[in-house]
Image (tube, grey):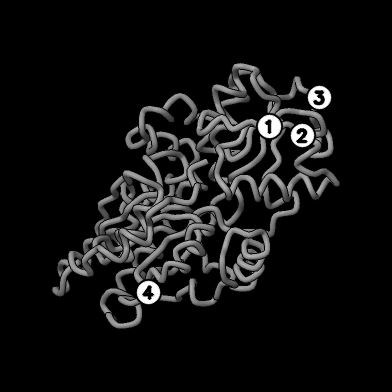
Amino acid sequence: MRAARAAGLVLVLLAASCGGGTGDTATSAKHMTLVLDWVPNPDHVGIYSAMDKGFFARYGVTVTPRPPSGVSDALTLVGAGRADVGVSYEPELFFAQEHHAPVAAVATIVPTALASIIASGSSGIHSPADLRGKTIGVDGTQSTAAFVDRVLSSAGLGSGDVHIVDVKFNQVPALLGGKVDAVAGVFQNIEGVLFAMRGLHPVVFPYDRYGVPAYDELVVVANADRLRDDADYRTTVREFVAGLAAGTDWAKAHPGAAVAVMRRHSADDYRNVLEQSVPATLRLLGTGPPPEAAWARFGTWMFESGLLDEKPDAAALIARP
């Protein structure tokens, strides 16, 4: 639900200054500002493990993470040169490309879909086909509508076979309160865990297992122009990715200690799910190059689903620092 297309991205990008990045000196280039996709939560366990356990420092980088004020902040600020790197969503990069934003994905963080349709176990829903006649709470965004349509289509259903209710971004209380049978746009590793803790016995349908092409939920984004023109920036981004990979590997090997890391850093809203959500997240993490062929398939699907006005250039959205 955090990956909704943000209105006004193009205006912010066109108006923003290209200054304010890391600066020209070698010393300042080693300090990186990282804009998160959301407030600190289990999805960021690799980042905070790399900070706390010294893996960024091992590669000569210090990192200052910043929570965003909106879902487009990472792309806006990185594209404008006002932050060094960011965390964003693969679909958002395709939207940004239509606005000519100079951003590119340099590494995966979560190389699988987190966003899902999640149903209450008491609703009798065990597969997408069982959604027939059921009520699904959605956030009202075009992206979620396209994802839901594709999941339904994979089961031979159409939007007329279900009851769609716009609950805005109140999917959690809508399902907990029994107002809907299922919700769309929630994350399997966080909201899915919360629903299980509340006794709903959730049934989870990740988008990319039910008709939607494989995509990377979370990626590291960098400024494409600076990657092309600034060798020091390329090196520092490469060091950041190496530190992130090491921190992620450490967290996966030490899940209990990784929970402790997130107790120190997580936003208050997520503290009550850390014991279960962090291990669930660690199983899904992976730092590596974004797969160009998979991005091309996903971008084509977005275009054919009406989410994009023009057929995208997936290769241009991926960089190897």
Give the label on residue 224, or none: 4
- Judged left or right of residue 37, residue 121 is right
Q: Which secondary structure, mark 4? A: helix
> Which numbered disc, 2 or 3, marks the residue closer to the eye?
2
Alpha carbon distance from label 2 to label 3: 14 Å
Q: Earlier in the sequence, mark 2 or mark 4?
A: 2
Mark 2 lies on residue: 162
Quarter where residue 55 is shown: bottom left
Across and down, in percent, residue 230 comes to: 27, 80
Distance CA(mark 4)–CA(mark 3): 48 Å
Amino acid at circle 3: Gly
Of pointers 4 and 3, the one earlier in the residue sequence = 3
Q: What kind of element bears circle 1?
A: strand
To which residue does mark 1 refer?
136
Say whether disc 1 or disc 2 marks the residue closer to the N-terminus: 1
Disc on the earlier residue, 2 or 3: 3
Label 2 to label 4: alpha-carbon separation: 42 Å
Image height of 299 relative to 1, above or below: below
Q: Quadrant of residue 298?
A: bottom right
Label 4 neighbour load within 10 Å: few <14, some 14-19, many 20+: many
Residue assigned mark 3: 124
Up-down: is 191 above or below 307?
above
Q: CA distance from mark 4 to mark 1?
A: 39 Å
Q: Nearer the viewer, residue 115 or 238?
A: 115
